[in-house]
Amino acid sequence: MNGATQGGKDRRKQFVVSGVCCATEEHVLRKRLDATIGSQRYTFSLLSSELRVDPDIPDAQVIRDLRGAGFQGRLKQEFHAPQSFLERHGQALWTAAAGLLTVIGMAAEWLGIPPLVSRAFLLAAILGGGWQVLVKAFAAVRARTLDMNVLMTLAVIGALLIDRWSEGAAVLVLFSVALMLESYSTSRTRRAIESLLAITPQQANILRGSSEHTIPAADIGPGDILRIRPGERIPIDGIIVEGESAVDQAAITGESIPVEKKRGETVYAGSLNGRGSLTVEASKNYEETTLAHIIHLVEEAEHKRAPVQSQVDRFAAVYTPAVLAVAVLVAVIPPLLFSLPFEEWLYRALVLLVIACPCALVISTPVTLVSALTNGARHGILIKGGKQVEALESVRAIAFDKTGTLTDGRMRVTDVIPLDHRSPDEILVLAAALESRSEHLLAAAMVEESARRGFAHDTVVVEAFASLPGRGVTATIDGVHYFLGNLELCREQQMYSPELHHRFEELTGDGKTAVILGASDGALGIIALRDQLRPQSREVLHTLRKQGMRHVVMLSGDNERVARAIAEDAGIEVWKAGLLPDQKVEAVLQLKKEYGGVAMVGDGINDAPALAAATVGIAMGGAGNDTALETADIVLMGDNLNRIPHLVGVSRLAMRIIRQNILIALGLKVLFLILSIGGFATLWMAILADDGASLVVIANGLRALGFRNGKY
């Protein structure tokens, strides 16, 4: 195991690298770092420009290696420190100065001023605006790599050799402007991720004895007691020990409205407290909160390449040397074989050099995928990588677990049927009083329903309580012997009748669980309960079908009657009941044979084998559930099924954008390949088209950030 990771947490030092603009420049950087510190001792993300290195490697060595590759780097904490005006805008000032010098030089040419003067201004523009390009080109040549800096440098040198000084300067200025705009554009995705970090408070108010102290949030540990005032963000995951409040936890679960929280309930770091004051006992360390886990997994996802991204990179690796070879042939063959003007054909070859750079093609995929990942995180959806985004597009069948997924996983009272003169309310109060001593799920549902109706069952004195496993409970109230349980207990108490059996069967036939309340003088009533369908389930399933899901199936471990009732309520035509975990896996594998891509939605623990067998495994309710966060391909942080259509929508949008971007990038390359060989394209046009394509695909990819409610 790498020494940089301990206990599952990444201990590597983080640096921000400036100026890495495409995969070919990334190759130069990696080649340098592989040679000096080793490929296993660092990770680098092109889109976030973040370099992580093992903690035992000196900072000075990392900075030195970055400079040797032609780049600048700083520790991440220094990167976020306040910067001077020159540090923030140095590149823009250099580019502006180079642009001004170019305009002056071109004006001098137009006015007929001696060439020495105009060339002096143009040379100053080339060196001032392009010195970073020249440094990177030198580093790439040392690394035996053809990157865009080498191609641009060759194009400028060629332009000077054929006395096209103004075009050579303009090429470098336009190139510098494009790099600057690309940097500003791609930084939007980085800022979106960093916005998650920004919502975590850096300080906390901790209670020690009777006094309150303000300490760094990083120093909080499990068991510490914190005071959270109205309007403050919660710095740590914990349990409320005192107070009630509405808590906005959109950053964690994506819920659009605050959630009412009271004593004994969990709150998450990064959530915003409402109007109530809360006292919270920390349950985790600062680095182990749910929010920290989300940020860590999203950052990891940036490093995971989707198959389409790898295919594009492989194509780009062949494309650049192929176009360079064509450029050489264009410059050499016409003059040698057909005695055509060398200067003219060299110029056409220089245009080809400019369009040989695959930047637009290479950047088109990662910027779109990271935009989709970030959009998901903003809406409480944790997508583990670009591979999952791509896989979702092929999914045409989706399988749902029943309990806790299509239903809310909580039993509720649906019917209270009197069998004698007592009212339904009296029967419910007696049942709640009997069950108040029990820990069974059915007991909790009856106690909750009694409280919801405003009945004080706790005023009823229960004596001689006894639990009868598998049958029910018995007790004495006001000297009367009562029982509450199933038909078997009813037979034991000699209260059974065909009419009672018929009523009981009617309820269970509707997928409900029924219990009978009886006393020494006979059966008093029947109470029916059922796990309720989530309110949004039917709408979500309808939306998924509109999105192209050809097959929706429910896989349940519950009995056939209960499964049928829920499936009918949800509008699901195909369902399977009584399935063990391995049988759910078999059902998923069969769906894969029939439909190809299959998504499985479950709770992330009980359904782990089926989630793993599916093309894409989606776990519900991952907030606070470390197992779901680690095992599923995609985690819905809240228990909101509406996130699934959003997930499908943003994934399909991302893949559409990627195809559009590839078409834009390749289309322009092919067009200018033809134009340049035919002599219809200039260096100006080529650089504008090449860098323009990069900006277009970045802007197009960023659309995935704004996807919401099926629109963007």
Image: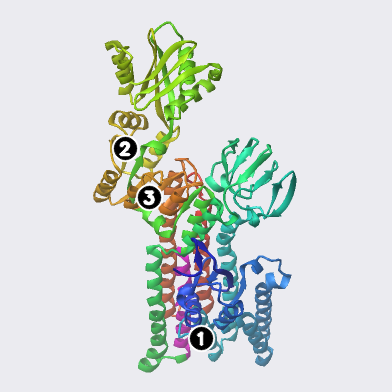
Q: Which residue is mark 2?
A: 557
Q: Is residue 657 above or below residue 226?
A: below
In the image, residue 493 lies at what x, y percent? Answer: 33, 14
* Sequence-first disc among 1 and 3: 1
Q: Quadrant of the N terminus?
A: bottom left
Which residue type does callout 1 highlight? Leu
In the image, residue 709 lies at what x, y percent? Answer: 50, 44
Separation of marks 1 and 3 at Cα, in angstroms: 50 Å
Q: Which residue is mark 1?
A: 154
Q: Which residue is mark 3?
A: 617
Dot 1, how many residues are within 10 Å of its Cα: few (below 14), some (14-19), or many (20+)? some
In the image, residue 380 lies at what x, y percent? Answer: 51, 47
Secondary-structure class at tag 2: loop
Residue at far top of view: 421
Q: Is residue 10 visible?
A: yes
* Sequence-first disc among 3 and 2: 2
Q: Is residue 436 above or below residue 537?
A: above
Which residue type does callout 3 highlight? Gly
Residue 569 has which mark? none
Residue at far right of view: 211
* Sequence-first disc among 2 and 1: 1
- The magenta region covers 343-365
Separation of marks 2 and 1 at Cα, in angstroms: 67 Å
Q: Quadrant of residue 587?
A: top left
In the image, residue 333 lies at what x, y percent? Answer: 37, 90
